[in-house]
Amino acid sequence: MSRIGRKPIPIPKGVTTQLDGTRITVKGPKGEISRLIHAELAVAVEGETIVVRRPSDESRHKALHGLTRTLVANMVDGVTKGFAKALEIQGVGYKAEPKPFGVQLVVGFSHPVPYHAPQGIKISVDNNVLVKIEGVDKELVGQVAAEIRAIRPPEPYKGKGIRYAGEQVRRKAGKTAQAAK
């Protein structure tokens, strides 16, 4: 059995789970999340835990077993604690402004770039250069962070752009002048 897949997922107080065929819905204090589970795997609520079972020992089923267990565990964590990612903006004149639809970025283009946040995602801006993305769906939080970073990824010469908090950008040396002949 998969080492990850066989571990039962504890259900904390205040969290309810509902199984409807291949769809699992988890509700908690931070919100609600729903996901389709692969049809070949069985998910069951046993007492205060959620258990994922696979039909055989095929490598495909083993991989799906661990993946499904992790996805369900992330759903439970999301509705209890939530997930967050932070982005830093570096560059002269580069900044972010919170808007009702999401965030508006000024990152060296001739125009400000608006980013419309999907439903269930909260974007906040600290000090015009620190963008914090929060939500209950780990996958969606990471996707939004990647999309915002892709607007202006950090460049290797001056390091300007949008980067994850704590990300190290490898810097390159610029051109050097040739000696006169």
Image (tube, rainbow, N blue to C red):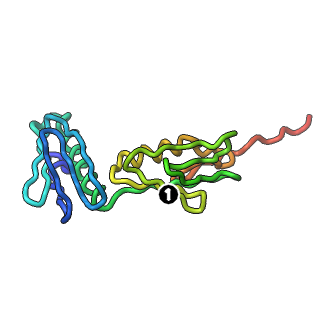
Q: Which residue is drawn at 19% across and 36% down?
A: 38
Q: Looking at the image, is 61 positioned above or below residue 91?
A: above
Task: Point out residue 130 in the picture as x, y percentages from the top left corner.
Answer: 55, 58
Q: Where does the N terminus fall, quadrant-wise?
A: top left
**Residue furthest bottom as drawn:** 13
Quarter of the image with the C terminus in it: top right
The one nearer the camera, 39 or 112, is: 112
Name the residue located 52 percent from the left edge and 43 percent from the top edge.
115
User: To which residue does mark 1 refer?
Assistant: 124
Answer few, some or many: residues within 10 Å of disc 1's Cα (few below 14, many 20 plus, some between 14 and 19): some
Name the spot of residue 157 as percent of width and height, x first.
Answer: 68, 45
Q: Is mark 1 on a helix, strand or loop?
A: strand
Residue drawn at x 64%, y 49% as measured from the top left? 159
Residue at (65% x, 51% y) in the render:
94
Q: In this view, does 53 lie to the left or right of 76?
A: left
Left/right placement of residue 178 relative to residue 47 reads right
In the rendered structure, the answer to whether residue 102 lies left or right of residue 83 reads right
- In this figure, what is the number of numbered marks? 1
Image check: 84 left or right of 104? left
Residue ranking furthest to the front: 100
Q: Dividing the picture into quarters, in which one does residue 15 lie?
A: bottom left
Q: Position of residue 87 (x, y in %)?
A: 52, 53
Q: Position of residue 32 (x, y in %)?
A: 27, 52
* Amino acid tagged 1: Ser
